[in-house]
Image: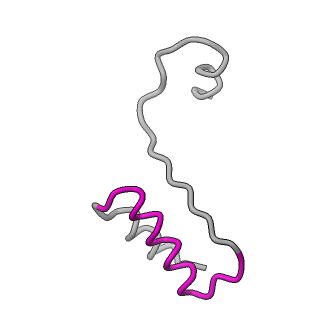
Amino acid sequence: MVPDEDIGAVLAGAAPPQAKGQRLIDLANAHGGRDNVSVVLMRGGETSKKSGVMAKSWTK
């Protein structure tokens, strides 16, 4: 519902993740959101130095 350019502008901003998520929800509703609107924001970082099944699955 929200143009990619608008999403990019929100994500590039300096606001905290919670505020960015709420802004994206508000934009989706303003653009005629027809159903439930959900937003998940994740920040990438360095890969884990831990060993084990879960750590190995994250590095693939």
Q: Position of residue 33 (x, y in %)?
A: 64, 82
Question: In the rendered image of this protein, does residue 51 appear above or below residue 5?
Answer: above
**Image height of 54 relative to 25, above or below:** above
The residue located at (59%, 28%) in the rendering is 58
- Tell me, yes or no, whether the highlighted magenta stretch contains residue 29: yes
In terms of depth relative to the viewer, which is nearer, 1 or 38?
38
Majority secondary structure of magenta residues: helix
* Quadrant containing the N terminus in the rendered view: bottom right
Q: Position of residue 19 (x, y in %)?
A: 39, 64
Which residue of the protein is positioned furthest toward the right in this rendering? Answer: 35
Residue most extreme to the top: 51
- State the residue at coordinates (49%, 78%): 26
Q: How many marks?
A: 0
| Left or right of 16 on screen, residue 50 | right
Where is residue 54 shown, x and y percent of the image? 64, 22
**Residue at 50%, 79% in the rendered image:** 27
Quadrant of res 38: bottom right
x, y percentage for residue 4?
51, 73
Residue closest to the far left: 14
User: Where does the magenta region start and end?
Assistant: 15-35
Answer left or right for 17 relative to 24. left
Quadrant position of the C terminus in the picture: top right
**Does the stretch in magenta take in 51?**
no
